[in-house]
Amino acid sequence: MRWAKPFFKHVFLISSLGIAALLIIISVSVYLWQSTDEGRLPAKTAVVLHAINNNLVNLDINIRPPRIVTGGSGGGPSLLREDLFIPVQGDVQIPMRMYRPQGEGPFPIIMYYHGGAFLEGYGSIDTHDNIIRSLASRTNSIVLAPSYRVAPEYIFPAAIEDSYSALDWAVKHAESFHGDVERISVVGDSAGGNIATVTAMMARDRNGPEITSQVLLYPLTTFQDVPLESREIYDSGYYLLSRQVMYRARDLYTPDELMWSNPYSSPLQAEDLSDLPPTLIITAEFDPLRDEGEAYAERLAEFGVPVRATRYRGVMHGFVSFYEVMQSGRYGLQETSSFLRQANQGTLQIADQYEIQVRQPPQGLDRVRDQTEAFAIAAYLIGRSGADLLNDN
């Protein structure tokens, strides 16, 4: 058995070299993914973007939980879910999803308007179900998410009229689902951020319900051709939104150039932004919509609207949707939930002097966690790519 000791020694050596080589490959890969022409990305952002842009993960989230579900990842209070249809203009009915806490309430109401470039196939209540459900859990509120009609079949103003009709329906039927009409907020992301603030404007202009607060996640705020640096720098689509998609949205949703200057399509250029609710605007560093979201925050402040704006460093458009895998996404969701809870409790405090807050990428233990997870995901992606290559051969 003299051969056993040197044999196992060689096996151990070869295994160690193999592991070392794999770690080097992973480290070099992540380093390369982090390096972009627009700046160096945090490891987790780089890995997630690499996976998405190389079609290594499926983004078609189609979650269909049972009627009673938990609030979000990691548990939370049980929620009641209901998929229903509501009437809108033109003798039409549209789908709407509701999550609500169990109990008699009355509970605050959140109208959530999903993103998706105003276009068919780019977003839905299914692709945003994780945010809708989690907000209901984290704020102990009823969240209503209408599936408004989109282009190219339905052009402006169908989407916003549907969205306002959904708000009107919520007010009229609040008692049936234990909602509190004195505490209604609007929330939306990307195109949905546009719809959320426009819905608040319509409520003001049409003597509709008083909106308690609005939260706009990386909102599109103008269809006009205005000089915006972020639109020029991050227009490739690598950061999950391209100039091509933005132009397609404008051409199909607002085909008449006169529509671009309507305050209900381009709230950034609205003549009157007064009397809108306290506002939280969240933007992402690597996002073509970053500058117009922050410009809209400044304009709201100029009209005396209490507004808080936070730019998240090191992340891309839509990052809050990835809160289950990105720490910065969890931060964004936590900030959104906290703002809504404080608004509902009447404890919201916003500085009179507007100033954008910049949130750095995760630090300390959160940074270690993100990086560790990033390398683990990278190892999986590299292994999967290798397996796919072998299968192709």
Image (cartoon, rainbow, N blue to C red):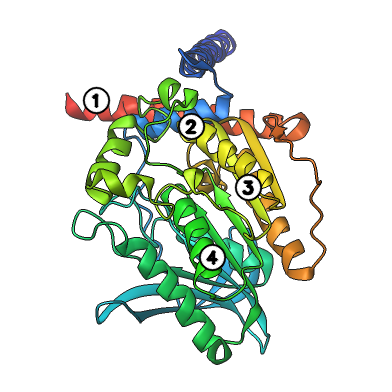
Q: CA distance from mark 1 to mark 3?
A: 56 Å
Identify the residue at the far front of this view: 271
Q: Are marks 3 and 2 in contact (CB under 8 Å)?
A: no
Amino acid of disc 4: Arg
Q: Earlier in the sequence, mark 3 or mark 2?
A: 2
Q: Earlier in the sequence, mark 1 or mark 4?
A: 4
Q: Are marks 3 and 4 in contact (CB under 8 Å)?
A: no
Residue 341 vertical position relative to residue 307 in the rendered view, above or below? below
Q: Nearer the viewer, residue 332 or 280?
A: 280
Q: Nearer the viewer, mark 3 or mark 2?
A: 3
Amino acid of disc 1: Leu
Report crowding for label 4: few under 14, some 14 to 19, many 20 or more residues within 10 A (C-alpha). Answer: many
Q: Position of residue 115 (x, y in %)?
A: 41, 52
Q: Can residue 316 be seen by looking at this rendering?
A: no
Amino acid of disc 2: Asp
Q: CA distance from mark 1 to mark 2?
A: 36 Å
Q: Earlier in the sequence, mark 1 or mark 3?
A: 3
Residue 54 vertical position relative to residue 336 in the rendered view, above or below? above
User: In the rendered image, which residue does mark 1 sit on?
Assistant: 390
Q: Nearer the viewer, residue 249 or 40?
A: 249
Choose top left, top right, bottom left or bottom right for residue 183: bottom right
Q: Position of residue 294 (x, y in %)?
A: 59, 37
Q: Secondary structure at mark 3?
A: helix
Amino acid of disc 3: Leu
Q: CA distance from mark 2 to mark 4?
A: 25 Å
Report crowding for label 2: few under 14, some 14 to 19, many 20 or more residues within 10 A (C-alpha). Answer: many
Q: Earlier in the sequence, mark 2 or mark 4?
A: 4
User: In the rendered image, which residue does mark 2 sit on?
Assistant: 287
Q: Nearer the viewer, mark 1 or mark 4?
A: 4
